[in-house]
Image (cartoon, rainbow, N blue to C red):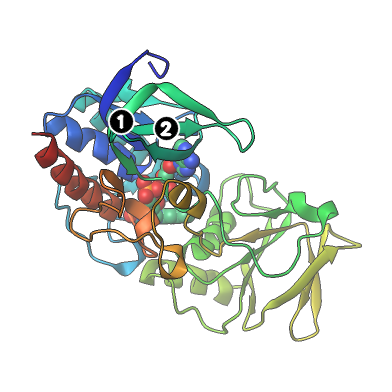
Amino acid sequence: MIHENGRIVDIAIIGAGPGGMASAIEAKLAGTENIIVIDKAPHHNDMIHKFYKKGKRVDKDWMGIKFEFTGNVSFEECSKEEYIDQMDEKLKAAGVLDKFEYNHEIMRVEKGEDGLFSIVYGMEGVSERLESIKAKNVILSVGRMGKPNRPRYKFPKEIKQVLNFNLSKVQNGEHVMVVGGGDTAGEYAYGLVEMEGMEDCVVTLNYRKAEITRMNPINTEMCMKYLDNGKMINKMGVDVESVEAGEERAVKVNFTDGTSCEYDRVVYALGGTTPKDILVNSGVKTGEWDVPVYDEKTFETNVEGLYTIGDVVTDQGSIALAFNHASDAIKSIASKLK
Ligand SMILES: Cc1cc2nc3c(=O)[nH]c(=O)nc-3n(C[C@H](O)[C@H](O)[C@H](O)COP(=O)(O)OP(=O)(O)OC[C@H]3O[C@@H](n4cnc5c(N)ncnc54)[C@H](O)[C@@H]3O)c2cc1C
């Protein structure tokens, strides 16, 4: 479909996470069927596939913030796997599954003199323009996890493969230190303690503050339980100064209090940054902390017809919030298409 010649779509949606997926359903319900959804991954909701641990509970009020669904798309709280099934069902029921195109990484969109957007994909130096498709409107819903935050110190080349940003490479029996103080760090740390098949892992939680202050009540309670009963090792109240190759285990972590410990793996959960490149390269102005400048009611950016929703525009994103943004952006686009 992506190579169908001369096609002009009403909306090109970049990113098939909660924001992009809900945009496709909302568009269909608003009577706009001529759309395309493009994602670099081989399936929708890739961030959830990749970064949520097996069996994770998907909360509606994520990070303790209460949400009401304001659009047509909602979800029932359930496990990660059930959530993905629910989304499959919703996309099927809305009849939009055939609008999704996978395995295309978009680098930027360019508004031409004809007022239509061209879509540029590929890698720097070998980028290719999708000459075949142009879009009247674009929704960028590319999330933040493309570029997880990294610590300020260097990752030595020889140990890079054991310095990770999610749990996917952890092996049973490893000594793993999780770094971070938010919900993701908490869920990684206690999730690993509880994970089936990982019973022999030794998990340490490292956070620069001595107290857990940024996790929701459930995650705080779970972490405290395992820190208190010794199933999780407490290395809080101290920051990491540097990492280097270890002698007994792969990584030697040097802390700011002069101590050091060795681990088989370090997993960083320090949040993610706005994927600034695709925004800036598409002409979107960004303000403080790289957050795009956009209309808070419609989510339209300074480039007319170019919208941005979901995690890209908030540092406290959630699935419900991304669904609600999608509803507002589609309302704005649908009213213009009439
Ligand atoms: C470990 C963890 C646990 C969480 N738990 C919860 C929870 O329980 N409840 C909750 O509500 N929220 C939770 N969140 C937050 C929630 O997952 C996000 O707020 C939500 O996924 C944001 O949706 P999005 O569509 O904005 O972005 P994303 O879900 O990040 O989706 C972005 C999509 O864009 C694609 N993409 C990126 N760049 C490009 C490109 N250049 N070209 C093409 N495609 C691209 C990606 O492949 C991805 O599919 C959690 C987050 C994490 C990390």
The quadrant in which the N terminus is found is top left
Q: Position of residue 25 (x, y in %)?
A: 21, 34
Question: Hey, which residue is sitting farthest front in the picture?
Answer: 113
Name the side, left or right, on which 195 lies relative to 259: left
Kindly give the residue lying farthest to the right in the view shown: 247
| Residue with the mark numbered 1 | 135
- Callout 2 amino acid: Ile
- Secondary structure beneath dot 2 equals strand
Mark 2 vs 1: CB contact within 8 A: yes
Neighbor class of circle 1 (other Cα within 10 Å; few <14, some 14-19, many 20+) is many
- In this rendering, the answer to whether 270 lies above or below 39 is below
Q: Is residue 302 above or below residue 140?
A: below
Residue occupied by mark 2 = 119
Dot 1: element: strand
203 sits to left or right of 328: right
Considering only vertical position in the picture, is 123 above or below 59? above
Q: Nearest the camera: 31 or 208?
A: 31
CA distance separating discs 2 and 1: 8 Å
Q: Residues within 10 Å of mark 2 (few under 14, many from 20)?
A: many
Name the residue located 45 percent from the left edge and 63 percent from the top edge: 290
Residue drawn at 43 percent across, 22 percent down: 131
The quarter of the rendered structure image containing the C terminus is top left
Q: Is residue 263 left or right of residue 279?
A: right
Give the residue displayed 76% in from the left and 53% down from the top.
160
